Image (spheres, rainbow, N blue to C red):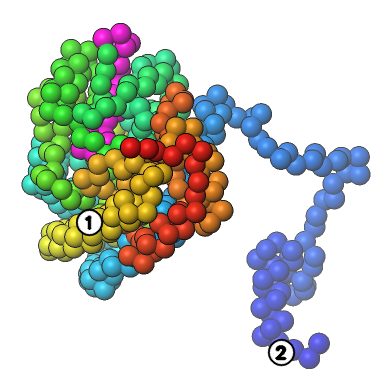
């Protein structure tokens, strides 16, 4: 073949490594022995679906539809932060510093509860910014808030246990908690948040987004918070406070965490860095009541053991050196300007079709559509290249209100204007009238 001995040796070595050749010193190279399949044996056809082999919990998880986020920002996909303005150079410097001094240590196995300096930074930040009570010893670092919901559901719920869910609510929480076999009970949301009635079955767990209800944007009032805390105290049930985006509050004073009002250790506080920093960081956290700490750490070891140690260390440095606070201040200003532009554009060009719900913060705006029009208008929006995440799918018991959840945080001003311009071609059979 006219090739060198080095090339031949490399080829033989690769074949040997993959099990195709057996090489014996002084004898030569031989094709490795293989036993052929008996001629009467047939290979079963591949199944197009494995649903028949799933457990009941597996079926429940698949029926829930999973959770997905857009890989790239476009109008008006919801929930994405703007990663173009993240201080990547600062982050790279912090990474390099850690790798120079602690590369071997950070490459090893980590504490399943989380990197201690990061837990200390999280506890200090939550106390200052959100009035969350608790020490670093009560912080559990996780990969995501979705992982936290699965972990807590497995730890706290049995088959048939009642879970009060906001209606409408975050779909990922609904799927995670339903997968435990729990009975999800929708509780209506009004302008003051979750509004339970006296005829509801008593809960084992209550899931809330009190600072910025997802998706309506309202805040749970103080009287409702106190009433739900009293229910938790009397019934011995747990409250999960999912504080998914309180870093981005634009209008008025931000609401303190519900956990800070709890004097009986019934509230589990969840937060994430996916929106405040960047999604691929894969870091979230829970401030746990003392009674749940050791069980939760044990269960965490059954998931992925621990979060990435290098990313935990760099995140701790990013917070402790003031970069986190600086970044949040800038992003609040940027996101507020984009929110205001979107509201102005909708008011000027789509007020006949969309009704805006108050949006004091967050990364998306809820707009209400004429009754019965969501499916049709969503198809029209897709036809002109605009994503409009729907409101109906967030209801546990349809039919709910028709609407869209329009993300704006990751979009430039020009993309916001262009997205609204494209939606001007939409037509509804029954548009809103004054």
Q: Is residue 17 left or right of residue 302?
A: right
Q: Is residue 93 left or right of residue 173?
A: left
Residue 130: x and y in percent read 13, 42
Instruction: Report the predominant secondary structure element of the magenta stretch.
Output: loop
Depicted 30 relative to depicted 173: above or below: below
Return the residue nearer the eye: 193 or 377: 377
Question: Quick one: SS at disc 2?
Answer: loop
Residue 56: x and y in percent read 55, 24
**The N terminus sits in image quarter:** bottom right
Q: Determine which of the numbered discs, if any, sits on residue 69 in the image.
A: none
Q: Can residue 270 be seen in this view?
A: no
Residue positioned 69% across, 67% down in the render: 16
- The boundaries of the magenta stretch are 198-215
Residue 343: x and y in percent read 29, 52
Q: Is residue 200 magenta?
A: yes
Residue positioned 41% across, 18% down in the render: 183
Instruction: Rate crowding at label 2 as few (under 14), some (14 to 19) or many (20 or more) other CA atoms within 10 Å.
Output: few
* Image quadrant in which you'd find residue 80: bottom left
**The C terminus sits in image quarter:** top left
Q: Does the magenta stretch include residue 114?
A: no
Q: Closer to the observer: label 1 or label 2?
A: 1
State the residue position of label 2. Answer: 4
Q: Residue furthest right?
A: 39
Q: In this view, does 374 lie to the left or right of 187?
A: right
Q: Label 1 to label 2, Cα distance in Å? A: 66 Å
State the residue position of label 1. Answer: 336
Return the residue nearer the eye: 282 or 192: 192
Residue positioned 66% across, 78% down in the render: 10
Question: Quick one: SS at disc 1?
Answer: helix
């Amino acid at each position: 073949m006219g090739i060198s001995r080095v090339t031949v040796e490399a080829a033989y070595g690769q074949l040997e490594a993959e099990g195709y050749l057996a090489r014996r010193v002084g004898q030569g190279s031989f094709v490795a022995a293989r036993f052929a399949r008996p001629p009467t044996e047939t290979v079963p056809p591949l199944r197009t679906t494995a649903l028949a082999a799933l457990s009941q919990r597996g079926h429940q998880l698949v029926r829930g539809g999973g959770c997905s986020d857009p890989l790239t920002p476009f109008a008006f996909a919801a929930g994405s932060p703007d990663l173009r303005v993240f201080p990547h150079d600062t982050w790279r410097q912090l990474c390099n510093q850690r790798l120079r001094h602690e590369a071997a240590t950070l490459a090893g196995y980590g504490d399943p509860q989380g990197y201690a300096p990061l837990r200390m930074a999280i506890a200090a930040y939550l106390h200052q910014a959100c009035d969350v009570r608790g020490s670093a010893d009560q912080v559990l670092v996780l990969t995501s808030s979705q992982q936290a919901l699965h972990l807590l559901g497995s730890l706290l719920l049995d088959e048939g246990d009642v879970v009060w869910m906001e209606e409408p609510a975050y779909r990922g929480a609904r799927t995670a908690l339903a997968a435990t076999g729990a009975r999800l009970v929708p509780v209506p949301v009004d302008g003051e948040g979750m509004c339970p009635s006296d005829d509801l079955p008593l809960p084992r767990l209550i899931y809330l987004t009190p600072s910025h209800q997802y998706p309506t944007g309202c805040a749970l009032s103080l009287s409702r918070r106190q009433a739900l805390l009293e229910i938790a105290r009397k019934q011995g049930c747990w409250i999960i406070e999912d504080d998914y985006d309180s870093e981005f509050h634009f209008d008025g004073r931000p609401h303190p965490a519900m956990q800070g009002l709890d004097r009986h250790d019934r509230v589990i506080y969840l937060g994430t860095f996916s929106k405040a920093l960047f999604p691929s960081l894969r870091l979230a956290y829970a401030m746990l009541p003392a009674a749940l700490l050791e069980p939760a750490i044990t269960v965490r070891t059954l998931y992925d053991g621990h979060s990435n140690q290098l990313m935990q260390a760099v995140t701790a440095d990013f917070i402790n050196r003031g970069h986190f606070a600086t970044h949040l201040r800038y992003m609040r200003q940027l996101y507020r300007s984009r929110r205001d532009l979107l509201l102005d554009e909708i008011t000027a060009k789509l007020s006949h079709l969309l009704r805006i719900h108050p949006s004091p913060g967050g990364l998306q705006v809820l707009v209400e559509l004429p009754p019965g029009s969501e499916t049709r208008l969503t198809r029209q929006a897709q036809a002109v290249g605009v994503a409009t995440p729907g409101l109906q799918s967030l209801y546990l018991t349809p039919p709910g209100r028709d609407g869209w959840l329009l993300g704006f945080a990751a979009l430039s001003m020009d993309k916001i204007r262009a997205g609204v311009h494209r939606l001007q071609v939409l037509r509804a059979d029954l548009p809103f009238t004054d």
